[in-house]
């Protein structure tokens, strides 16, 4: 009996010992793992504090990279400005007397070209420069921009003549001259586009490129008549023009007689016929296709004047492209 009791006690002692040793092993291993984690945490915390104490800006590598990017952007801007300025009309410094002679020569040439192209133009038309038809000399400071405007008008007339319009009724420009008296382009007054009176608008800053800006602009209004094909040719011609032109507004009117309603006769029986009127249609549904009708057009446009790039070597695009 006693021997069995001793055996049980020994077995329990062995089991308890094993459990104690296992607990000690687990505790030691956990402590070692905790020490490793604590050491890693301390290292990370030290590295984080070191990063917070650093002053990474400006990074010399970043500065070098951004300087190169800025150089590329500036070169691209120079190339773009050079391309935009390539065919634009520049102000021309000359004497007032020379300008007046140039104006009358240009007027004579435009009238002759209109006659050759079959374009009707009012007799002795001033092309928007009516105030200078008397021969009074403009102020010397106005001559460069007046010459520029005259050459732009000449280019616009070339587009209209090339589009084979039927009639050039009027051209209005922005007057910037000293003591501007708002001259009027000759045209009878009424509510139709073909008869609207065009007046030059006064704007002292017209065509001037403000300091620090990339461009200035001129505004012109053209009034003419032509077939639908001529209107499309005019728009295409302006898009292909050497000067930078943006059409801002187009008003087109056609001959109202083309849209007259007609009565339609429908036979009801062989003995009698009933005349039935076509029901009224909304104006939007009266579409005419396939007929090149004569149209009256009022076209407004802006001619942009771009600033010259300040870099001397501006003709070559960066990268050799």
Image (spheres, helix red, strand yellow):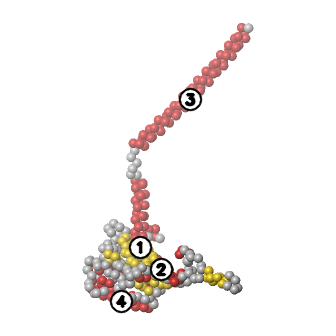
Q: Is mark 3 on a helix, strand or loop?
A: helix
Q: Is mark 4 on a helix, strand or loop?
A: loop
Q: Which one is in front in this view, the residue at disc 3 or the one at disc 4?
A: 4
Residue 174 percent coordinates (x, y): 34, 77
Q: Distance between the residues labelled 3 and 4?
A: 108 Å
Q: Earlier in the sequence, mark 4 or mark 2?
A: 4
Q: Residue at x 34, y 74 (%)?
A: 207
Residue projecting furthest to the top? 2
Q: Mark 4 points at which residue?
A: 124
Q: How far apart are marks 4 and 2 (CA)?
A: 26 Å
Residue 30 percent coordinates (x, y): 56, 29
- Direction from residue 164 to residue 261 in the image, left or right: right
- Direction from residue 312 to residue 166 in the image, left or right: right
Q: Which of marks 3 and 4 is nearer the N terminus?
A: 3
Q: Which of marks 4 and 1 is nearer the N terminus?
A: 1
Q: Residue at x 40, y 69 (%)?
A: 78
Q: Is mark 2 on a helix, strand or loop?
A: strand
Q: Which one is in front in this view, the residue at disc 4 or the one at disc 1?
A: 4
Q: Earlier in the sequence, mark 3 or mark 1?
A: 3
Q: Mark 2 points at which residue?
A: 253
Residue 142 percent coordinates (x, y): 28, 78
Q: Name the residue under label 3.
A: 30
Residue 112 percent coordinates (x, y): 40, 91
Q: Name the residue under label 1.
A: 84
- Report whether residue 127 is seen: no
- Direction from residue 122 to residue 270 in the image, left or right: right
Q: Distance between the residues labelled 1 and 2?
A: 34 Å
Q: Nearer the viewer, residue 123 or 237?
A: 123
Asked whether disc 3 touches disc 4, contact meaning CB atoms under 8 Å apart, the reply is: no
């Amino acid at each position: 009996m006693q021997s069995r009791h001793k055996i049980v006690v020994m077995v329990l002692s062995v089991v308890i010992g094993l459990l104690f040793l296992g607990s000690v092993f687990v505790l030691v291993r956990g402590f070692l793992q905790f020490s490793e984690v604590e050491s890693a945490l301390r290292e990370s915390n030290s590295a984080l504090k070191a990063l917070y104490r650093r002053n990474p800006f400006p990074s010399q590598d970043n500065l070098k990279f951004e300087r190169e990017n800025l150089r590329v952007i500036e070169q691209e801007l120079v190339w773009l400005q050079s391309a935009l300025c390539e065919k634009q009309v520049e102000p021309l410094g000359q004497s007032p007397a020379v300008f007046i002679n140039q104006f009358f020569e240009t007027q004579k040439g435009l009238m002759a070209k209109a006659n050759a192209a079959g374009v009707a133009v009012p007799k002795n038309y001033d092309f928007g420069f009516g105030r200078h038809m008397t021969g009074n000399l403009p102020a010397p400071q106005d001559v460069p921009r007046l010459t520029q405007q005259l050459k732009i008008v000449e280019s616009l007339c070339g587009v209209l003549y090339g589009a084979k319009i039927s009639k050039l009724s009027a051209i209005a420009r922005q007057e910037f001259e000293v003591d501007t008296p708002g001259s009027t382009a000759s045209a009878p007054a009424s509510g139709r586009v073909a008869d609207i009176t065009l007046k030059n608008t006064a704007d002292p800053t017209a065509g001037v490129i403000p300091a620090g800006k990339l461009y200035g602009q001129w505004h012109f209004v053209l009034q003419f008549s032509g077939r639908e094909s001529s209107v499309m040719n005019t728009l295409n011609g302006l898009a292909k023009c050497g000067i930078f032109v943006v059409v801002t507004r187009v008003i087109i009117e056609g001959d109202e007689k083309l849209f007259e309603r007609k009565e339609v006769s429908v036979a009801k029986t062989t003995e009698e016929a009933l005349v039935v009127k076509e029901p009224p249609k909304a104006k939007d549904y009266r579409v005419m296709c396939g007929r090149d009708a004569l149209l009256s057009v009022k076209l407004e446009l802006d001619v942009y004047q771009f600033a010259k790039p300040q870099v001397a070597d501006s003709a070559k695009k960066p990268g050799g492209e």
